[in-house]
Amino acid sequence: MVARETTADSLLDVEQTWADRLAYWGRFWWRDRGGVLGMLMFLVVVFSAIFSPAISPYDPLQQNLRDSKMPPAWYEEGRWDHPFGTDNLGRDIFSRIVYGTRVSLTVGFFGVLIAGMLGLVMGAIAGYIGGRVDSIIMGVVNLVLSLPYLLFVVFIAAVLGRSLINVILIFGITDSPIFARVTRGEVLRLRESGFVESAVSAGATWPRIIFDHILPNLIGPLITLATFEMSRMIFYEAGLGFLGLSVPPTVPSWGNMLAAGRKYLTSSPWIATFPGLAIMFTSLGMNLLGDWLRDVLDPRLRRTRK
Amino acid sequence: MYRYFLAKIGQSVLLLFGVIVLVFFMVRLTGDPASLMMSRNASPEQMEAFRERMGFNRPVYVQFADFFTGALVGDFGNSLHFKSPALPLVLERLPATVQLAVVGLLIAMFIGIPLGLLGGFQPGSAIDSIGRGLALLGQSIPNFWLALIMILFFAVRLGWFPSFGRDRWDSVIMPAFVLGLPTLGQLVRLTRSAVLEIRSADFIRTAYSKGLEPRVIYAKHVFRNVAIPLVSVIGVQFGYMLGGSIYIESIFAWPGMGQLLEQAIGWRDFPLVQAIAVFTSVVVLALNIFTDLAYAIIDPRIRYGS
Amino acid sequence: MPTILEVNNLVTRFYTLDGVVHAVNGVSFHLEEGETLAIVGESGSGKSVTMMSILGLIPSPPGKIESGEAYLYDGYERRDLLKMSDAELREIRGGQIGFVFQDPISSLNPVLTIGEQIAESLVRHLGLSREEARDRTIELLDLVGIPDPKARYRNYPHQFSGGMRQRVMIAIAIACGPKIVIADEPTTALDVTIQAQIVELFLRLQKELGMAIIWITHDLAVVSGLADRVLVMYGGRVAEVAPVDDLYEQPRHPYTVGLLGALPRLDSRESRRLVSIQGAPPDLLIPLKHCPFAWRCEYAFDRCWEEIPTLQPAGLNRKVACFYDLERGKPRHD
Ligand SMILES: Nc1ncnc2c1ncn2[C@@H]1O[C@H](COP(=O)(O)OP(=O)(O)OP(=O)(O)O)[C@@H](O)[C@H]1O
Ligand SMILES: [Mg+2]
């Protein structure tokens, strides 16, 4: 018997040239171009939120009625010290857009955090305990999910009044059923797959099972969902702002800016244009990112990537 | 199958019960419905008189029983603004909203489904890129902003369409398009991914092994399977459009339920808001039942299932 | 018996993002009229890809048939399936060559009646009218042993059991009177008792209709009662081909020895998976320049690590691709 390992010299063309490697990485990046672009766009937004004071040339609240409704810099009457122009009160639109990222990201981040935690707990309980507890939790979940969502969000926001905390709570609570449903589905799938039972019979404790087996499997779908839901919340926050139902009117948020710009649509269209573009930029980035994450993180979809 | 539907209808009745409870308590979230509905500068005497008139000083369970029995027969009390029963005011607005949603859905279907089919048949082709780009845009453009931009260009600048109202036959086109765009995007995505999935199913390989023409395989074997998930998404999206037209109706001054909702919130006319919320939920729940029915009719696995 | 199908040097690769999968690397074999040829080999040895390549059923991209010939004989005439246009191939598929796939659950369209799925082939190839196709379909359902075929015509696949669905698949395959039926692991997904029924059905149909059968399987136990000849595949190549009894009595390839060793008793009916050979099959992403079985082979010597053995005649009606002569117990000289 010849005990010989498969060594490199027994194989053909295993040496990769640099061109091959470059081509491989090129293909890799090209395949994931959407995700990379989405990530970059998202990072731009995060960066502006963190460094708002350094980036924005003006105080976003500072009014200057003499310079009000000034068009963007590339218009004839525009000036480069107000690149996106000014609004009806002479506030610098660029600075307000930059500060607007703070409201949007705060709502999106904390909204998803609350929704995710509530949903995780509800879904996990429903999935584990099953039976009547499951029917009750899922009954509530289905109730919320079958309602006309926007209508009810507008309704609650109108009742509670304008404040950042209220908006975050509204989204955090109304959005938790989606997380609950995904969590429950995933927990049930894992239970059915039988490895939880085998882990139990192998003497694993419940916390062990949850942290070692369940959470790692849940994390992918939940992160993907969180990305999409955060994008949706940013969207809806702006929508509420547009109806005058989100943060107080003095706060520079994209929705508030749109609401104000709507009155000057025909005379000074830029006031409404830029916040809309900002929402679109953020949403586009997060959707691209979410699509990519879904492909990469969801093991059931991985097959289709080839 | 009949049992399946009886169960569905039973479920919907339960959900409706949940909606009524929710709507009752929503106006009491702040603790005092009277201060929510009265203007801020109402005197304490006026407040007390209002409480007396609305019955807010009775015990909560009495109020609930009252509201609940009223809701069952369509009595939501009088609108504070119009001083007349709330439900007829809502019903009056129904046709406009339905018209908007139907036209929006038709636009979405007639553009979205063919694009999704073509993209799925030839992934990576130019038409596929167009479809996917449109899907991404539909998901990322805030529709309240798009509405403004479209008014600016197509109504104000170009004068092609009226910018608001419902007096002309072509008034519906712009608002319906804006309302339908997210659905259009969803349909492109869903159709495309369904085609891609079905295309590589084993039974399609069987169809090829029979020597059938690709044309026949797509029209008969692929499309019938793609239609099944489409039906349920179309149903859900239609419900979403009926309950989600608030921005669009308010921007285009479209005299439907969404505009009424916005106005009612402005007037603090919460009995009217409650009537809108319950009524829209009923419509959406009924729609869900119809969707399930349609689903069962085209999917033999449910039609002849146990 | 005259030859009906002859495949020479078939090479099929898949160009995936992970690299090139060398799925089929020069497979040659022939099939005679009315015979049953069994193809055995581990999972991933290229059995399905070989058959799908012949009929142009390889998904492309990523798949590509790089070279080879596949002659379909009609008397003295022969035509190369690999050079045919799509339209010509469609005439062959379902018309002259029928296919039965492994998983009867997923291989039938869930939203069409089974009657429709059989009849559409008849309409396509024999030009029957809808009524004629319907009558013929009911006959076919009866032929493959489905009780109450008239009523069953209107049923959907989910209303059938797995074994019944496989009978429907068989009805589809034989509908237009093909000369060849390719059955790709037709019994793997079924219960043991149902497996035996399906094997018997095939034997009966072959006796009645006289078609040749290519039977792809993992299960050597089934092979002994069914096949005339056996083709053993390994790593996308043919390791050995021989009449069934000769192969069982005197395997000439060490891999075949391993396969048979995996059987408890030679002619036992008990089914066994081909798993008990040590080591893993070759990684098809890497093109080899030596015998693909060398590192699992207890007889491997220097030459096995230097070149790839080709298929050589080794006795009456049999061929083997191995440098070691198992019969004489020493390297082969050629
Ligand atoms: N569409 C495809 N893309 C990439 N690789 C493929 C594709 N189809 C088959 N292959 C590869 O080709 C090789 C041979 O596969 P094939 O299906 O012919 O094996 P098999 O012998 O039929 O195995 P099994 O007994 O499991 O059916 C495998 O390594 C498989 O991964
Ligand atoms: Mg196979």
Image (cartoon, helix red, strand yellow):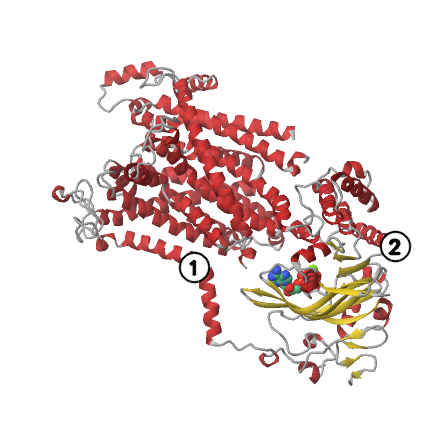
Side (left or right) of C8 relative to A46: right
The picture places residue A84, in percent across and down from the top left corner, at 23, 49
Q: Name the outermost residue toward the left.
A: A66
Same chain under badges 1 and 2? The reply is no
The picture places residue C205, in percent across and down from the top left corner, at 84, 52
Distance from mark 2 CB to nearest ligand 2 atom below 8 Å: no
The residue indicated by pointer 2 is C207
> Residue drawn at (57%, 45%), measured in percent from left and top?
A188
Query: From where the camera sits, is residue C172 visible?
Result: yes
- Foreground of the two, C215 or A216: C215
Residue C211 vertical position relative to residue A16 in the rendered view, above or below: above
Query: From where the camera sits, is residue A121 visible?
Result: no
> Residue drawn at (68%, 35%), measured in percent from left and top?
B304
- Foreground of the two, B161 or C283: B161
The picture places residue A10, in percent across and down from the top left corner, at 61, 80
The residue indicated by pointer 1 is A33
- Foreground of the two, A166 or C34: C34
Numbered disc 1: secondary structure: helix
Side (left or right) of A111 relative to C203: left
Q: Which chain does the numbered disc 1 sit on? A: A
Q: Nearer the viewer, mark 1 or mark 2?
A: 2
Circle 1: residue type = Arg
